[in-house]
């Protein structure tokens, strides 16, 4: 025992004693012979089978003194373990009667029993529940998204899910439902959303959701015989046509698309494809090739378009890595310019006169018309002249006072609109430079600009501003002062008030540092009460776009100056005050980054507003083509290339279908119309919320009505007469699973054997159901799991498996399962 001052005695163990001696020239003695191979106390025992073996020794009082062997492999028959009569601490035990105990087992082994979710192998044993390669017959649909589309024809049924990472986004089945082959995806995280087939090809559409694909609308075709995939359409909203597929159909070599773009008062005046980049100023070169794998090369042309909000998100990769500001030409002159040139006239701008040459000379005053109203505030709107089209927009920066003589001299100088090329990498600080520029050279900068198709007036300058805390700077920046997390019950508010009612269409928001802000208008009397509970009406909400904080990806823009957006009220609103209630802050950061400007990270109490403009719509804009946002597109796909054959206007078009007689049916709002002699004629008018549609060989029409009190498939004859409903009304309910209920059917199809397939875009459960045409439930395809799988087996009852809100009943003898309960309803 060692006695340590001030403490209780401590035990020290001496494990080895070594004695050293000087042997001189004597030989090294032989090592001492071992007295035995094993410790002195043998414990014999016999096993009936090979297995893992554990033995322990207990003292006379039953306490454990030694764990002798743990999970060692031993053979069947006679065996012996040896004990050195020591306890776990290496001390010899006291004399007495000791007891040994042992357990043995054959070892844990993995044995496949059956797969619960997806259940495809229970319905079709020839199909494995796991993939056999993306193109093989195994597996079932996508991890990140539920089923969305379904179509049938040519002896096949095709089902799709919009967002696969694992699994597949497209599956081809025979008419009995056995999977034949699949396709993982058609683009980054892009499977099949809406689907249509003419038996020869399958058409699928999806909106791009990843990286630089965001905002693009895609349509692909899949050859049923060869499985070849071909991209037919890749487009995004431009000044002529807005995107927004709301329905798809195919028949006899023709593809039909229903387009119903959201009515947007703040539609951009142009898209990137409208820009004549070679005649813009400054002139930026094409980016050089990468010098190493995965290098992100600065692309000033791309950044120029992004800073005008003509594509993607605002740039902001890294200091000196491309543009962060819009920059003018560089030189010693008093005036420097930015010129945005267009290939065709667009309805926006400080306009090129109709008889002015193109490309225009940025320095020639007679080539340009001034804006009706210039921007004056830090976050403001400049109003273009009425009813004009332009091929160029000029932004001029002036150093010093106006000088009429200098202006006249500039107009007589030669046209130098092309100037020397700009090399982005010559000046890492500004992002652009002119070779050989002297010390007198200068540039102007703008944080960014967005071009609206319509004409607006900014009402901020005439508003009285009040806030819940903090202060508002002269340039409109508000930083609230608070310590508690934001919440709907305890928000921050920013109020703009006018002396008389103003007609407001919406807000242009520079950026609000939050996750959610709600926008209200005052409906009360003359005295505006910001905290009043009864006299504010919600007209919109704002969730900012998040910066991507992921270096090494081209979309990384953590240093973007601002992430602007708009809040469209949907119609003109007359009010004396607008209130912005900031009710929630981001609580997570992902690789897509934090919303926070200046990379401040997560703070649930932070609230900042960097600029807001309440906008009044004013007359004088160029006429808008009604086909811009609402139309049926008819394409000829009988040749080598897809050709647009016709565009037909239809109010609020939705899902479409072609019946057995070749007639086109379309949702028009809450009604169904049929195309006859080139015009749509009303057919069905008793729907509450139609969501999907298909027809059968008798031209009967099947429509899923998503109204909460319905949620059934309504069946009509070809005259539009209601016949019957399929499914029990009301949608999914918590409790025992009822397969006769439907919830959110986004895809319907009738196969060649006369069965109705319904794709339900509810996530829990992921479900495709099959019905007879008279409404009798046949079977359901469930799954697959979300990314990473999961699930919990009841430790007291192995017939119960829980996965999210789903409870399954397992039959281990038969190797089958059924969905037993929906324990709660998920949003």
Image (cartoon, grey):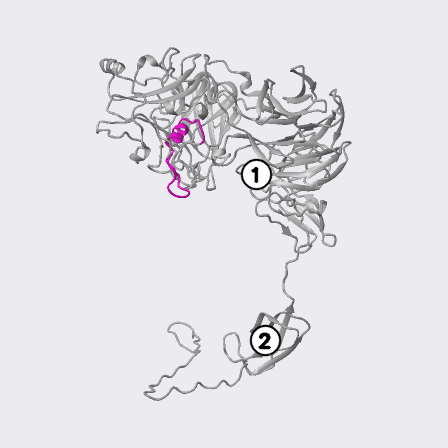
Of the numbered discs 1 and 2, the one sitting upstream in the chain is 2
Residue 375 in sight here: no
Alpha carbon of mark 1 to alpha carbon of mark 2: how far? 61 Å
The residue closer to the viewer here, 28 or 369, is 28
- The answer to which quarter of the image holds residue 644 is top right
In this picture, residue 166 sits left or right of residue 418 = right
Whether pointer 1 and pointer 2 mark residues with C-beta atoms closer than 8 Å, the reply is no
Determine the secondary structure under disc 1: loop
Q: Which residue is mark 2?
A: 57
The residue closer to the viewer here, 383 or 306, is 306
Residue that appears at 35% across and 37% down? 321
Check disc 2: other Cα within 10 Å, few if <14, some if 14-19, many if 20+.
many
Q: Position of residue 680 (x, y in %)?
A: 65, 17
Q: Position of residue 95 (x, y in %)?
A: 56, 83
Frontmost of labels 1 and 2 is: 1
Residue 26 to residue 135: above or below: below
The residue closer to the viewer here, 271 or 126, is 126
Q: Quadrant of the N terminus?
A: bottom left
Residue 6 to residue 601: above or below: below
Q: Which residue is mark 1?
A: 185
Residue that appears at 38% across and 12% down? 353
Q: Is residue 291 one of those drawn in magenta?
A: yes
In this picture, residue 716 sits left or right of residue 75 = right
Q: Position of residue 193 (x, y in %)?
A: 60, 33
Magenta segment range? 288-312
């Amino acid at each position: 025992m060692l006695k340590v001052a001030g403490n209780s005695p401590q035990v020290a163990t001496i494990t080895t004693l070594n004695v050293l001696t000087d042997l001189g020239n004597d030989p090294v003695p032989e090592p001492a012979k071992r007295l035995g191979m094993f410790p002195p106390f043998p414990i014999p025992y016999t096993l009936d089978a090979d297995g893992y073996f554990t033995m322990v020794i207990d003292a006379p009082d039953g306490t454990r003194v030694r764990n002798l062997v743990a999970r060692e492999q031993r053979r069947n028959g006679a065996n012996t373990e040896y004990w050195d009569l020591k306890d776990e601490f290496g001390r010899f035990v006291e004399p007495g009667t000791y007891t040994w105990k042992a357990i043995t087992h054959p070892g844990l082994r993995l044995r496949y029993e059956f797969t619960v979710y997806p259940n495809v192998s229970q319905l079709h044993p020839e199909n494995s529940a796991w993939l056999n390669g993306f193109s093989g017959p195994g597996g079932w649909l996508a991890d990140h998204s539920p089923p969305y589309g379904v179509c049938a024809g040519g002896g096949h049924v095709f089902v799709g899910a919009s967002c696969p990472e694992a699994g597949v986004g497209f599956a081809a089945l025979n008419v009995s439902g056995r999977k034949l082959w699949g396709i993982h995806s058609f683009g980054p995280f892009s499977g099949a959303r809406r689907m249509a087939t003419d038996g020869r090809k399958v058409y699928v559409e999806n909106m791009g959701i990843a990286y630089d694909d965001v905002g693009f609308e895609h349509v692909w075709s899949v050859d049923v015989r060869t499985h070849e995939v071909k991209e037919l359409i890749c487009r995004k909203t431009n000044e002529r046509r807005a995107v927004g597929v709301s329905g798809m159909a195919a028949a006899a070599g023709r593809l039909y698309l229903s387009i119903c773009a959201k009515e947007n008062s703040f539609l951009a005046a142009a898209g990137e494809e409208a820009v004549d980049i070679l005649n813009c100023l400054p002139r930026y070169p094409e980016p050089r090739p990468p010098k190493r794998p995965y290098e992100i090369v600065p692309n000033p042309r791309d950044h120029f378009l992004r800073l005008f909000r003509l594509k993607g998100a605002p740039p902001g990769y890294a200091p000196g890595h491309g543009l962060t500001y819009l920059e003018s030409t560089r030189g010693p002159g008093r005036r420097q310019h930015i010129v945005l040139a267009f290939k065709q006239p667009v309805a926006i701008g400080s306009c090129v006169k109709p008889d002015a040459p193109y490309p225009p000379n940025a320095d020639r005053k007679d080539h340009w018309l001034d804006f009706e109203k210039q921007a004056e505030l830090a976050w403001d709107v400049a109003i273009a002249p009425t009813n004009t089209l332009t091929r160029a927009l000029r932004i001029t920066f002036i150093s010093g006072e106006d000088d009429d003589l200098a202006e006249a001299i500039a107009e007589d100088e030669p046209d130098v609109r092309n100037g020397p090329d700009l090399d982005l990498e010559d000046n890492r600080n500004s992002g652009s430079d002119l070779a050989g520029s002297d010390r007198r050279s200068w540039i102007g900068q703008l944080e960014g600009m967005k071009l609206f198709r319509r004409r607006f007036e900014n009402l901020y300058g005439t508003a009285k501003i009040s806030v819940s805390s903090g202060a508002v700077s002269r340039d409109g920046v508000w930083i609230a002062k608070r310590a508690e997390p934001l919440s709907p019950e305890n928000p921050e508010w920013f109020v703009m008030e006018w002396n008389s009612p103003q007609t407001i269409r919406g807000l242009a928001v520079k950026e609000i540092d939050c996750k959610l802000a709600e926008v209200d208008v005052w409906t009360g009397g003359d005295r505006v009460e910001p905290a009043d509970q009864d006299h504010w009406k919600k007209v919109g909400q704002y969730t900012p776009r998040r910066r991507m904080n992921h270096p090494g990806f081209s979309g990384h823009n953590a240093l973007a100056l601002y992430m602007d957006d708009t809040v469209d009220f949907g119609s003109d609103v007359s009010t004396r005050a607008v209130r912005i209630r900031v009710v929630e802050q981001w609580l997570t950061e992902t690789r897509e980054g934090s919303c926070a400007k200046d990379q401040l990270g997560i703070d649930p109490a932070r609230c900042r507003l960097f600029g807001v403009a309440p906008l009044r719509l004013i007359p004088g804009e160029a006429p808008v083509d009604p086909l811009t946002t609402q139309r049926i597109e008819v394409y000829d796909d009988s040749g080598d290339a897809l050709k647009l054959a016709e565009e037909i206007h239809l109010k609020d078009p939705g899902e479409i279908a072609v019946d057995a007689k070749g007639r086109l049916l379309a949702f028009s709002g809450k009604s169904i119309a049929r195309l006859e002699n080139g015009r749509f004629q009303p057919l069905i008018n008793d729907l509450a919320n139609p969501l999907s549609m298909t027809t059968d060989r008798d031209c009967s029409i099947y429509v899923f009505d998503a109204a909460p009190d319905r949620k059934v498939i309504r069946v009509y004859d070809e005259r539009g007469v209601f016949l019957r409903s399929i499914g029990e009304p009301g949608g999914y309910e918590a409790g025992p699973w009822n397969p006769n209920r439907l919830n959110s059917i986004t895809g319907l199809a009738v196969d060649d054997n006369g069965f109705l397939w319904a794709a339900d875009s509810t996530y829990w459960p992921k479900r495709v159901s099959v019905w007879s045409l008279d409404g009798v439930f046949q079977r359901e395809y469930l799954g697959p799991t979300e990314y990473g799988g999961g699930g919990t087996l009841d430790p007291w009852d192995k017939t119960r498996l829980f996965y999210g809100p789903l409870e399954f009943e397992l039959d281990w003898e038969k190797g089958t399962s059924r969905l037993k309960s929906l324990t709660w309803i998920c949003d």
